[in-house]
Amino acid sequence: MPPVAFWMTSGPKTMLNFRCGIFTFKRDLLKGFILLLSITAFFAGACPAADMNNSYGDQEIGQAGSEKNEWDVKLGGGLRVGPRYEGSSNYSVSPVPYLHVSWRDTVSLGIGGLNVNVLRDRDYVLGAGLTYHPGRDEKGNSFFGTDLFGSDDRLKGLGDIDAAVGARLFGSYILGPVTFRGSLTKYMGSQNDGVLIDLGMAAPFHLANNIILSPGVRTTWASNSYMDTFFGVTPLQSSRSGFPAFDADSGIKDVTAGLNAMYLLDRHWFVAADASIKQLMNDADRSPITEAGLSSTVGTVVGYHF
């Protein structure tokens, strides 16, 4: 039947089914997008130095390619070793997927979530996006985490903290050899509705034509809500866990120093590694949940630039 004839003979029931089909498709597409965002952004905190240094040196990898295309895609994977949770003295090893997809240097999806560069010039970028916090399991487990030193029951009785999506504003400015970065993230979870403000700086340089090093430092301020969620202990949690009740106030949560290294094997393949040291500050360090205020994280990724 020709399309015109079909349209003329289609009744309200047919049109309703057609519209329902469109709605189902959009709903499934939205679910798929949220799942993809969750998987990639889940590991945003896995490699702090990588996040601070622009996701394993994406700019440098792009410069190593031939011509700048509308689409830029990098895929890879690696391992990360770090504390099971902030303040833990037990370490876990986790596989880390790496994904960075960008369109016209304007819209990107990667380790840090979904970002849109609203204003961009040679020396600065201002934008907004969505990110994701995986929350915290009562046992300190991550999605794929495997504890290297046995089980960790320190958080028993505190309960789980659900994952949360966050809205993010970010910016960066290049001044000479130094890149300054800042971001403000507002989480919108049922348990985690806190605010984080990150400020950092990095100084990438070429050790050789195919080797890039990028040392950097970063500090994070956390709101009262965020601090209470992750470092506070309510009277009910105290009775269940044995920890004394603790009210965690807003303030500087941590200071991190890290080094990112990038080795370009050829025009497509690259290997990246980073190491960072984090010191919890103020009530994050004083919390009875915190067993080790000073921690280190190391990670490595092997990737392919299409």
Image (tube, rainbow, N blue to C red):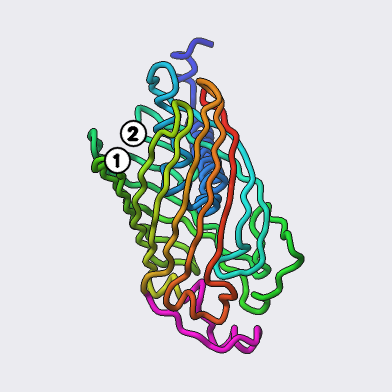
Task: Confirm whether the magenta stretch covers residue 233.
Answer: yes
Q: In the rendered structure, which amino acid carries the disc numbered 1? A: Pro
Say whether disc 1 or disc 2 marks the residue closer to the N-terminus.
2
| Observer able to see residue 151 | yes
Depicted 85 relative to depicted 158: above or below: above
Instruction: Left or right? Give the position of 185 relative to 82.
Output: left
Dot 2 falls on a residue whose secondary structure is: loop
Between 85 and 35, the one lying in front of the other is: 85
Q: Pointer 2: residues within 10 angstroms few (<14), some, or many (20+)?
A: some
Region of the chain picked out in magenta, as a range:
228-250
For residue 236, what is the image quadrant?
Answer: bottom right
Query: How far apart are the two marked residues, 1 and 2, measured between alpha carbons?
Result: 23 Å
Write the residue at 53% across / 46% down. Answer: 274
Quarter location, residue 254? bottom left
Residue at 66%, 61% in the rendered image? 91
x and y percent of residue 213 in the render?
45, 40
The extreme right residue here reads 150
Binning the other alpha carbons within 10 Å of mark 1 as few (below 14), some (14 to 19) or many (20 upward) gives few
What residue appears at the point 33 percent right and 57 percent down from the top-left corner?
A: 199
Q: Nearer the viewer, residue 284 or 178?
A: 178
Residue bearing mark 1: 177
Q: Position of residue 258 (x, y in %)?
A: 46, 52
**Foreground residue, 96 or 217?**
217
Instruction: Give the amino acid at mark 2.
Output: Thr
Res. 13 in view? no
According to the picture, the residue beneath numbered tag 2 turns out to be: 106
Magenta-colored stretch includes residue 73: no
